[in-house]
């Protein structure tokens, strides 16, 4: 099964909705606190994301959204509280072990590795995968799903435009077929046309059963694919609601998300 | 003394052999710095450990090959232990902590060699097959030095292939630039660091036993080599493998030829060379700007 292609382009792929290779489960976060030095950036945050659900994590700059994603991926220098995924506690596991549990993280700054070609950057996404999938097949699938990367496979990853680098960062993160994808500000600094393409991809991933946790400044974009909204403000979780309710709640949008 | 072309060429080969030793030591030093940001002051001691482990093995087995294997294995194991148990708790604390620690490791290893093997040093004879010289038509050259240079070049070619073409190489190239993304993509970087430290120490140990037939082994033999290897990595550019190779052979030849033309300046030659390179290129021949910033 050509997993990446199937996962990402599910809406048009056929009648049977394919499932991600790693059996997903609920992400449950409870009493999460995280610090940068003395700054207490995430304070007693708790929420859950159901399998196959898309949750948008919204809030102003500095609300603690990125720190929450980093804590879920195991990248915060200091944290407390519990995080479990598909019934397994994750909060003591190092970042690389969380990858093997089916988590993928697309960082805000993309982190395309300098000195490596596009192909090598994608290869990095498979390098630790225990599935031992055929690399050429996966790269061919990615080239189909991300047509913009196809002609650029052998050029340096960092020589591409910001939007293309964002695509590469996503392609690399999903190469191993994760069941939960953490996306940090994917639309930031990306041209509107590419953002459209990107959100089509996310919709495809969601339709294929991949769970999404999305941090996004562009609220409207996030509401396009999200099922629920969690709002953070000054490190605290202040609001959890359905997308429909949030969309009509101008007061909440103005209070927590207006720039 | 007449300086003939023959003599210059012979001295250049001697310089290349010296350079091969520098390169083997500096490549490990450079890899360890490039990936772990550890300035490894124990690297000269690993060189010495390789020489002693090899000579001791040679006494029991009589085999030069076994001596080489023992040199690599023992120094790599001591390197692995140093990283796993001693250096690792200091990551994230700034560059000076591991620097001082490895300085201490080096003192412990040098004193251990004095206690175990005595202060006056040991020597090892080359097997007969490697003694003597070969006539290349334009001069008569020592066989072992030629083999040392050729062997180092083969090893470097294999290392280059490994780094450019293999899965491990990709991990090393990515890890030198962005260890965080490796962790996020499922790589246990602490294992990569352990392997790199052990590999670098093993290379230094190999250099130690390969240099031992030419210069013998003393507990302090690593000190001078460490200084030279640091000069090589600085001239080549910190963390750059290609830089370490070019600068290593270049400095070996420069030192060796200075010995021929102006013996009084031979110790100085290396540092003059370094000063000139750094004046022209502050990051070394192949260095990246801002690596330490």
Image: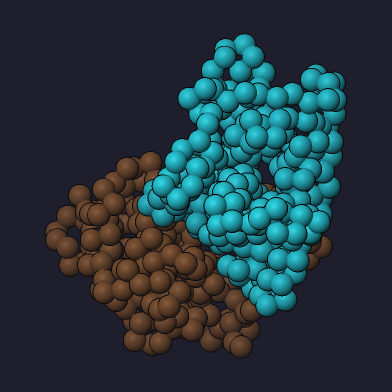
Chain colours: A brown, B cyan
Q: Position of residue B193 (x, y in %)?
A: 60, 45
Q: Position of residue B166 (x, y in %)?
A: 39, 48
Q: Position of residue B258 (x, y in %)?
A: 70, 58
Task: Answer whether residue A117 is visible to the viewer in this image.
Answer: yes
| Residue A213 shown left or right of residue B268 in the figure | left
| Residue A222 shown left or right of residue B94 in the figure | left
- In the image, what residue occupies the spot 51% across and 42% down? B141
- In the image, what residue occupies the spot 35% across and 53% down? A177
Position of residue A182 relative to residue A200, above or below, is: above
Residue furthest left as drawn: A15
Q: Give the total of numbered labels.
A: 0
- In the image, what residue occupies the spot 23% across and 54% down? A137
Quarter of the rendering occupied by the C terminus of chain B: bottom right
Task: Answer whether residue A214 is visible to the viewer in this image.
Answer: no
Q: For residue B237, which quarter of the picture?
A: bottom right
Residue furthest front as drawn: B2
- In the image, what residue occupies the spot 82% across and 43% down? B103
């Amino acid at each position: 099964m050509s997993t990446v292609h199937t996962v990402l382009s599910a809406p048009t792929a056929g009648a049977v909705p394919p499932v991600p290779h790693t059996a997903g489960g609920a992400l449950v976060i409870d009493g999460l606190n995280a610090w940068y030095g003395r700054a207490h950036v995430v304070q007693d945050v708790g929420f859950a994301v159901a399998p196959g659900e898309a949750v948008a994590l919204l809030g102003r700059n500095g609300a603690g959204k990125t720190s929450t994603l980093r804590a879920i991926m195991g990248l915060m220098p200091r944290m407390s509280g519990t995080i479990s995924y598909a019934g397994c506690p994750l909060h003591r596991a190092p970042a690389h072990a969380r990858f093997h549990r089916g988590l993928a993280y697309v960082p805000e700054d993309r982190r395309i590795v300098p000195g490596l070609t596009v192909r090598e950057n994608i290869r990095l996404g498979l390098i630790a995968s225990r599935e031992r999938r055929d690399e050429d097949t996966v790269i061919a699938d990615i080239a189909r799903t991300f047509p913009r990367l196809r002609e650029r496979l052998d050029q340096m990853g960092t020589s591409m435009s910001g939007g293309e680098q964002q695509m590469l960062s996503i392609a690399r993160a999903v190469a191993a077929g994760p069941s939960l994808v953490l996306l940090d500000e994917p639309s930031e600094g990306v041209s509107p046309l590419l953002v459209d393409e990107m959100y089509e991809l996310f919709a495809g991933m969601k339709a294929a059963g991949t769970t999404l946790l999305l941090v996004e400044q562009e609220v409207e974009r996030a509401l396009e694919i999200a099922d629920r909204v969690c709002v953070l403000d000054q490190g605290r979780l202040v609001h959890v609601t359905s997308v429909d309710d949030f969309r009509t709640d101008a007061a909440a949008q103005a209070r927590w998300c207006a720039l | 003394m007449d300086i003939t072309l023959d003599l210059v060429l012979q001295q250049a080969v001697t310089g290349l052999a010296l350079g091969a030793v520098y390169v083997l030591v500096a490549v490990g030093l450079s890899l360890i710095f490039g990936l772990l940001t550890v300035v490894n002051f124990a690297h000269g001691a690993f060189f010495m450990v390789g020489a002693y482990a090899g000579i001791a093995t040679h006494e029991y087995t009589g085999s030069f090959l076994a001596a080489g294997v023992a040199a690599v294995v023992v120094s790599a194991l001591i390197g692995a232990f140093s990283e796993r148990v001693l250096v690792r708790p200091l990551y994230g604390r700034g560059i000076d902590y591991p620097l001082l620690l490895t300085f201490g490791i080096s003192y412990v290893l040098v004193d251990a060699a004095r206690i175990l093997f005595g202060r006056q040093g040991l020597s090892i004879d080359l097997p007969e097959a490697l003694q003597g010289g070969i006539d290349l038509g334009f001069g008569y050259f020592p066989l072992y030095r030629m083999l040392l240079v050729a062997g180092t070049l083969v090893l470097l070619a294999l290392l280059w292939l490994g780094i450019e073409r293999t899965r491990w190489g990709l991990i090393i190239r990515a890890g030198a630039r962005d260890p965080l993304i490796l962790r996020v993509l499922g790589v246990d970087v602490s294992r990569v660091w352990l392997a790199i430290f052990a590999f670098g120490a093993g290379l230094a140990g190999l250099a130690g036993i390969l240099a031992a037939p030419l210069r013998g082994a003393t507990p302090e033999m690593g000190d001078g080599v460490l200084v030279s290897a640091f000069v090589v990595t600085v001239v080549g550019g910190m963390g750059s493998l290609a830089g370490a190779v070019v600068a290593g052979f270049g400095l070996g030849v420069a030192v060796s030829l200075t010995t021929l033309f102006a013996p009084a300046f031979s110790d100085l030659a290396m540092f003059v060379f370094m000063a000139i390179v750094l004046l022209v290129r502050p990051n070394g021949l192949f260095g990246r700007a801002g690596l330490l910033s």
